Image: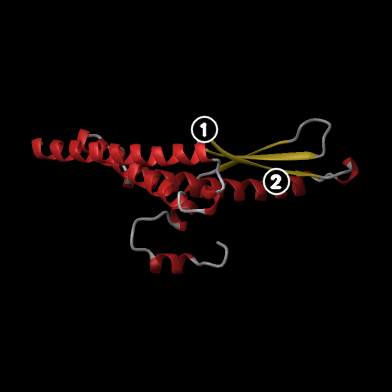
Amino acid sequence: MSGVSEAELQAKAVAPRVTLDQINALMATAEVRFERPEGTTSTFAHVYIGTFYLASGHSACISVENYDKEIGERIARGNAIKKATDQLWQLEGYALFKLLNPPPTTFVQRLELELQVLTERAGKLGHFLGTELFGNLPQTDKDLLVKQVGLMNELYTVLTERLERSKANA
């Protein structure tokens, strides 16, 4: 884990997170299946949890005389396990993210999300208007971007009013 220990991450964590124990428990249920295409010096290892495919690893040698099934499988397995472990970190991280950030289900929540996204985008565009890159644009493009910021500000006002009314009527 590139210079950071699991103990250090646990000590610093103040919110839910995916842990090494979770990943290791999942990997303990993983199955590796090997494949060697006929007439090649390649060995492929495919990692599954149940019927769910996670990742593949590969090994090969240049000369068929040097091919060793056990070594090829060991190298391919190591490559596959590393990729599968990385894949599980991503999948479990995304699953936790979805759990902690459920999609909006009410009208007010959807308005709040729309307002949040608009605020973020308008802020980024407003920042861009102050950059040298903006200053180097053709005047027509600058005018359009300024107009866009103005329209985004108008939309912000409308969304804010709708949100206030929706909350008042809830």
Going by the numbered disc 2, the residue's amino acid type is: Ala
Circle 2 Cα neighbour tier, 10 Å, few/some/many (<14 / 14–19 / ≥20): many
Q: What residue lies at 26% left-to-right and 36% top-to-bottom?
A: 110
| Left or right relative to 64: residue 84 | left
Which residue does the numbered mark 1 point to in the structure image? 51
| Left or right relative to 38: residue 33 | left
Quadrant containing the C terminus is top left
Going by the numbered disc 1, the residue's amino acid type is: Thr
Q: What residue lies at 54% left-to-right and 44% top-to-bottom?
A: 30
Per the image, label 1 sits on a secondary structure element best described as: loop
Say which label, 1 or 2, has the lower sequence index: 1
Q: Residue reaching furthest top?
A: 38
Picture mark count: 2
Residue 99 sits in which quadrant? top left
Work out whether residue 170 or residue 53 is closer to the camera in this orientation and state it. Answer: 170
Whole-percent x and y of residue 169?
9, 35
Q: What residue lies at 45% left-to-right and 36% top-to-bottom?
A: 144
Circle 1 Cα neighbour tier, 10 Å, few/some/many (<14 / 14–19 / ≥20): few
Which residue does the numbered mark 2 point to in the structure image? 76
Per the image, label 2 sits on a secondary structure element best described as: helix
Residue 167 sits in which quadrant? top left
Q: Describe the colour scheme in one phrase.
A: secondary structure
Q: CA distance from mark 1 to mark 2?
A: 20 Å
Whole-percent x and y of residue 86?
55, 49
- In the image, residue 4 sits, relative to residue 134, either above or below, namely below
Work out whether residue 141 or residue 165 is closer to the camera in this orientation and state it. Answer: 141
Quadrant containing the N terminus is bottom right
Q: Residue reaching furthest left?
A: 169
- Label number found at residue 38: none
- In the image, residue 20 sits, relative to residue 122, either above or below, namely below
Whole-percent x and y of residue 124?
42, 48
